[in-house]
């Protein structure tokens, strides 16, 4: 039996009629009332919850983990190639040790020997000791050769000067002449005494002859002869006086020449000393410049850590880091954090810092808990510096003991303060009302 469900067109309901749309488009009032109430209740719960819910405000910046005595880099200052490496990776070194020599035209051992002799032996030693054979040797000093040759030339000149000793010989001869003249002078004095005595007797004879001539006992011829004899004796005495004075003058002149020779010799020795000292100091300063240019020293004591594999004859560039020296006392860990200037006023010493290390992913190892120890007062390139200490060392929030790796980098989050969520909601309104009140 087939049932016929066909209905006439008049019996069909017109769902697009006005009456149908009015019934279907009208929402019951009880749904509106209960819906609005639910939304309001949810809003109230959220508002009350936002007052009690707090979350930390953080400032993020890059951080590098190092030690209180951080490693010191050894930077290459001269372009070229490595001539010699004197240490291996992991070797213990003392401050001032030479770890590498950069190729140059000077022979390293020759430079060291010359420097040692110049430092350990003074110029006085070179002057007084004529057996300083080292300075007469030939050294391969490259760019230092010119200054060493000048020192050697001056030393050899002075050595020849002291060995020839012509001024000392002249002084000896002059002293001998002075002594001979003094002997001659003494003989002249003795002779003068005899002449003076003879003149005294001649005067007495003349006085007697004068009396006899006045008494007409002797003739005028005999008196004239007596007068002439007295005059001759006086001339002889006066001549000896002149001779003695000339001898005295000659002795004084020779003594003056002797003093001048002594002064000349002292001046020449002083000049040699001064020139030798100057060229010695110049050579030492040039050696220091050479060492600073071609030698790489350890700035501190510790352990050598090469940044890469280095070998002899390997090319190097200025500014490259050859190695780092890790101090032996490197147990105290510290973080160097760079904080942007935006929001820096919220930061204070003692605030907590959460550190996520790139070497130890935080999802796997956790984070480090730190604390701000100090803050820089002046920014550099838009960032302030901060020293971060770690009260629990390198123990992470997952109780993992992390192995210290020098200069580990990561991100630091400084917890400045905890704010209520409610305050964050109303903050824009505070700012808006503040601007309005300022404008009025």
Image (spheres, grey):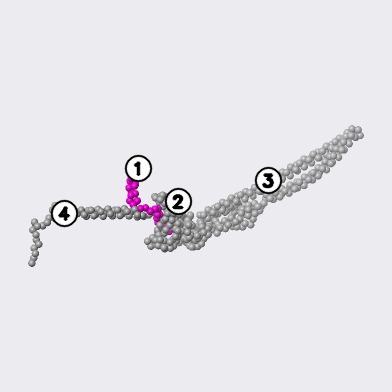
Residue in the foreground of this view, choosing between 129 and 49:
49
Q: Is residue 289 left or right of residue 396?
A: right
The x and y percentages for residue 362 are: 38, 60
Q: Is residue 418 left or right of residue 198?
A: left
The x and y percentages for residue 361 are: 39, 61
Q: Where is mark 4, residue-wise?
A: 23
* Residue ID at (33%, 43%): 436
Quadrant of the frame with the C terminus: top left
Q: Nearer the viewer, mark 2 or mark 3?
A: 2
* Residue ID at (75%, 46%): 181
The x and y percentages for residue 406 are: 45, 59
Q: Nearer the viewer, mark 4 or mark 1?
A: 4
Instruction: Please report whichever mark, 2 or 3, sits nearer to the chain's N-terminal start.
Output: 3
Quadrant of the frame with the N terminus: bottom left
Q: Where is mark 1, residue-wise?
A: 438
| Placement of 386 over or under 221, stated as above or below | below
Q: Where is mark 3, residue-wise?
A: 260
- Residue 38 visible in rendering: yes
- State the SS at label 3: helix
Q: Give the magenta-colored segment's residue range.
A: 407-435
Structural distance between the alpha carbons of marks 2 and 1: 35 Å
Q: Nearer the viewer, mark 4 or mark 3?
A: 4
């Amino acid at each position: 039996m087939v049932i016929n469900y066909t209905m006439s067109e008049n019996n069909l309901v017109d769902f697009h009629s006005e009456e149908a749309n009015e019934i279907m488009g009208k929402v019951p009032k009880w749904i509106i009332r209960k819906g609005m109430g639910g939304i309001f209740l949810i809003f109230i719960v959220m508002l009350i919850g936002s007052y009690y819910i707090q979350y930390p405000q953080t400032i993020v910046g890059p951080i590098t983990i190092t030690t209180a005595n951080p490693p010191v880099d050894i930077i290459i200052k001269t372009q070229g190639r490595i001539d010699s490496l004197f240490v291996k990776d992991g070797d213990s070194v003392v401050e001032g040790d030479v770890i590498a020599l950069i190729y140059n035209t000077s022979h390293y051992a020759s430079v060291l020997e010359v420097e040692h002799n110049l430092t350990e032996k003074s110029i006085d030693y070179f002057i007084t000791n004529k057996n300083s054979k080292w300075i007469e040797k030939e050294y391969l000093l490259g760019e230092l050769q010119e200054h060493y040759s000048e020192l050697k030339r001056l030393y050899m000149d002075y050595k020849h000067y002291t060995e020839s000793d012509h001024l000392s010989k002249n002084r000896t001869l002059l002293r001998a002449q002075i002594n001979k003249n003094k002997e001659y002078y003494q003989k002249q004095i003795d002779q003068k005494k005899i002449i003076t005595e003879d003149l005294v007797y001649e005067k007495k004879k003349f006085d007697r002859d004068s009396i006899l001539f006045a008494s007409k006992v002797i003739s005028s011829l005999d008196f004239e002869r007596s007068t002439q004899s007295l005059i001759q004796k006086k001339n002889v005495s006066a001549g000896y006086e002149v001779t003695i004075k000339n001898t005295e003058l000659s002795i004084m002149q020779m003594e003056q020449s002797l003093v001048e020779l002594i002064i000349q010799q002292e001046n020449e020795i002083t000049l040699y000393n001064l020139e030798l000292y100057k060229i010695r100091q110049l050579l030492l300063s040039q050696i220091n410049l050479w060492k600073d240019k071609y030698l790489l020293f350890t700035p501190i004591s510790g352990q050598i850590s090469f940044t890469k594999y280095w070998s002899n004859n390997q090319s190097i560039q200025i500014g490259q880091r050859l190695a780092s020296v890790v101090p032996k006392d490197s147990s105290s860990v510290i973080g160097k954090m760079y904080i942007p200037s935006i929001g820096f006023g919220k930061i204070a010493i003692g605030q907590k810092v959460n550190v996520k290390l790139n070497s130890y992913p935080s999802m796997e190892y956790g984070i480090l808990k730190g604390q701000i120890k100090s803050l820089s007062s002046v920014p550099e390139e838009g960032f302030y510096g901060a020293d971060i200490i770690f009260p629990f060392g390198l123990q992470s929030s997952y109780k993992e003991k992390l192995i210290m790796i020098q200069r580990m980098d990561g991100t630091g989050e400084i917890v400045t303060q905890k704010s209520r969520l409610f305050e964050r909601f109303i903050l824009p309104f505070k700012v808006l009302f503040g601007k309005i009140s300022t404008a009025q």
